[in-house]
Image (cartoon, rainbow, N blue to C red):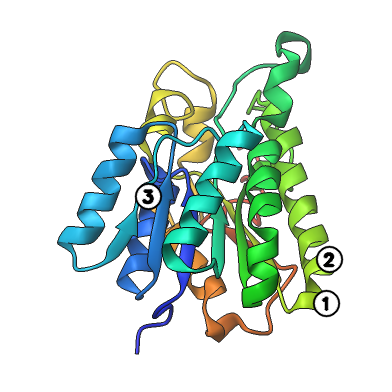
Amino acid sequence: MRRLEGKVALVSGTARGPGKAAALRFAAEGALVVVGDLLHEEALETQRQIGREGGTALAPGPVDVTRPASVEGWVAEAAEAFGGIDIILAHAGTVRLGFLAEESHDGSPATVDPVWLVARAAWPHLIRSRGCVVTIGSTVGIRASLSHHRTARHDSKGGVGALTRRLAAEGSAHGIRANCVSLGPVDTESARADLLAEALPPRDSVRPTPLDRLGTPQDIARVAAFLASEEASSVSGAHLVVDGGWSAVLPDPLT
C-alpha cells in the first residue's frame, strides 16, 4: 500500500520547484492532491501531469497565498470536494537579495504570512482528521551568511521554523503533527535566475557541498512525503535540513 493512500493533501506553490515536486510525489504515494498557485496555468499543468501518471488532483483556481480570502476559498473548495483535509504542505515565498537598509518592508513577511494563512484556514479540518503540517523552510532560517545578502529571506524563513514549532505544540492536543523541511541550495528555475546567476556573488559559495551537488526539488519532496506519512507518526516539531551537508560543514581555511 502506498504511504499516503486516500489522504487529502493541500499543497501550495505547485507551479514549479519543490511545491510541484511535492504534489507529484504525494500523488504517487496515493494522496488526493489539491494544487494551488498564483501561476494558475502552471499549476494546471501540474494537475494534468498528476492525471497522466495515474493520480488524482484538483486545481480550484489561482491562489494568492498572501490574501486571506483567496486562501480560505481554496481550502474550503478542497474540503468540500474531498470531504476533508489530512495534510497541508505550505510552501511559498521568493528569494530577495539585498542588505537590510536596501530592502522594503514588504519583503520580510513574504514567506511567513502565506504559511500562517494556509495553516490557519486548514486548521479545523486538520483537527477533525488528526492531520499533519509540513512547511518548507531554508538553511538561511538557521544560519546567517556573510555572502548571501538576503536579510528579509533570513527573517521570514526563520519565522517559518518558529511557526512550525508552535503548530506542533498547539496541534499536539488534537493529534496534529507539524514539521519543517529546510532546503539548502536547490537547482530550480527561480534559483538559476537569481541565486545561481553568473553575475551574483552567492553563486560560487552555494555550489560546493559535502555531497558535491546541488539539491533537487525531488530531494525535498521525498523528505516531505516521509514526514506526511505514518512512518513519521512520532515525529513532530522537527526541523529536517536537506542541504547536502552544506550548513553543517565550515568552509575550508584559506591557503
Residue farthest to the bottom, as pictured:
1
SS of the residue under disc 1? helix
Give me the C-alpha separation between circle 1 and circle 2.
7 Å
Give me the C-alpha separation between circle 3 and circle 1.
31 Å
Query: Of the residues under marks 3 and 1, which one precedes in the sequence?
Result: 3
Q: Which residue bears the numbered disc 1?
A: 173
Q: Which mark is residue 20?
A: 3
- The amino acid type of the residue labelled 1 equals Ala
Q: Nearer the viewer, residue 240 or 227?
A: 227
Q: Which mark is residue 55?
A: none
> Label 3 neighbourhood size at 10 Å, few (<14), some (14-19), many (20+)?
many
Q: Position of residue 99 (x, y in %)?
A: 72, 16
Tag 3 and tag 2, C-beta contact below 8 Å: no
Residue farthest to the front, as pictured:
80
SS of the residue under disc 3? helix
Query: Of the residues under marks 3 and 2, which one precedes in the sequence?
Result: 3
Quarter of the rendering containing residue 190: top left
